[in-house]
Each structure stands twice: as structure tokens, then as C-alpha cells.
Image (cartoon, helix red, strand yellow):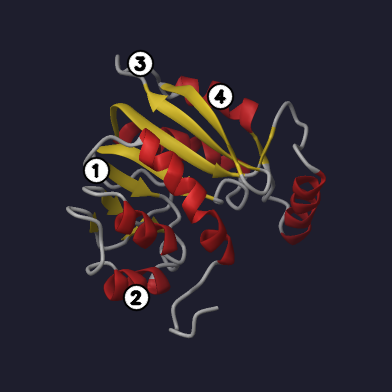
Amino acid sequence: MPDDGLPFSPACLRNQEPILGVLRRRLPAGARVLEVGSGSGQHAIHMARHLPGVHWQPSDRPGQLDGLVRRVALEGRDGLAPGATVAAPLPLDVTQPDWPAGPFEAVFTANTLHIMPAEAVPFLLAGSARVLVAGGLLLLYGPFRYGDRHTSQSNMAFDAHLGSLDAVMGVRDAEALAPEAARQGLQWLADETMPANNRLLVFQRRRDGGGA
């Protein structure tokens, strides 16, 4: 762990390059990206250092912003890719209606769905749909089940561990997300295989504005 007093996530360090590879292929030039649950802020800084023109908006739950604010203040101005910016972090509770107005070309979140209660996931989908431009992308990174089956023994063990910590947490079923996303006007566009039995699910806001 770096000795700089900033929060640090080993998972962010491991997955930032694979995620960056997908964002390079998927994001339009000059994309405005809302990150939900930015945590340590490592993704925000890394992506802004490697994606020219990106405008990255970090956010996290009220009361969880201190470390994120410090990282952006210390690292979010220098060494960024040409034209890239990292905005001051915003408080965001996905279950509340007061999301950043946007609009955004993408909403990105990593390793949050299995932490938030299952009841909060539809709020995440609905909020993302509201702030995305037509054709904008929702990118969900983390472990997922398929048809109520785990993709690996390690994910099964992780799911059991989450449940032992808090019954509201757990690895979500990717196939169960699709109908709720569709109700919000989000079409399942892609399912990217990622290292360590993770996935990056990509949904696209319908260009005709359909959805609930």
C-alpha cells in the first residue's frame, strides 16, 4: 500500500488496465463519464491519465467522500491526458432522485452492485438512464452470476463471504439485470470477459428515448 495517506484499493490496481482497454474501445472522444461509487479515486485518476479529452465525474455515497476528495485534489490536475479533466467529487446515493444532471455519454461503476442491497440496483439502472444521452453507455464491472449459476468456485466463495458479512450483499445475476434495464430504456449491448472471473456488462440508452 502506498505510504501517501490516501485510500488504496488493490482490486483497483489490478483491474484498471483491463477496464481501460474496454473504455478505449467503447467511449466516444471527449466523453463525459459519471463514475458511481468512486471509492479510493484510483480509477478516476488512471482513466483521466490515459483517455485524452475524457471528462470524469467521480462520486460516492455521502459520508464516504473524504479520501476521494483528497486524491482528486492531489492527483487530479497534473499528468492527465491531453484535454482530460477530473471534476470535484459529488455525493451520490443511487436510491435518491438528486443525481448529477449531466448529461453524460457514459455511467461507469466497478465492484458496487454486490455491495449495495439488491433493492438498490433498479435505482442504479433508472438513475443511469435518466442522466445518459441517447446512445450513452452504462458500464457495470464486477463478478456476476448467469441463470443463478456462478461462473467459478472463487465467485461462489466470494458470494458466501459477502452474505456472511451482510445479508443484503451478494453477487448479482447478469441475466436478471437485463429485463429491469430494458424497462429503463437500456439495451444490453455487450458482455466483456475480464480477468479474475469478472465481467464488464455494457448497456446502451435507447436512441428513441424508450423505457419507463
Q: What residue type is labelled 1?
A: Ala
Q: Name the residue under label 1.
A: 101
Mark 2 vs mark 1: in front: 2
| Dot placed on the residue nearer the N-terminal end, 3 or 4 | 4
Q: Quadrant of residue 146?
A: top right
Q: How many residues crowd around disc 2 within 10 Å: few (fewer than 14), some, or many (20 or more)?
A: some
Secondary structure category for the residue under label 3: loop
Q: Report the residue that reaches farthest toward the left.
A: 83
Residues under numbered marks 4 and 2 in contact, where contact means CB atoms less than 8 Å apart: no
Q: Mark 2 points at which residue?
A: 70
Secondary structure category for the residue under label 4: helix
Image coordinates for residue 66, horizontal then vertical, percent: 39, 74
Q: Name the residue under label 3.
A: 210
Task: Establish if 184 lies above or below 15.
Answer: above
* Spatial CA span between label 2 and label 3: 39 Å
Q: Can residue 95 be seen in this view?
A: no
**Residue 178 badge:** 4
* Spatial CA span between label 3 and label 1: 19 Å
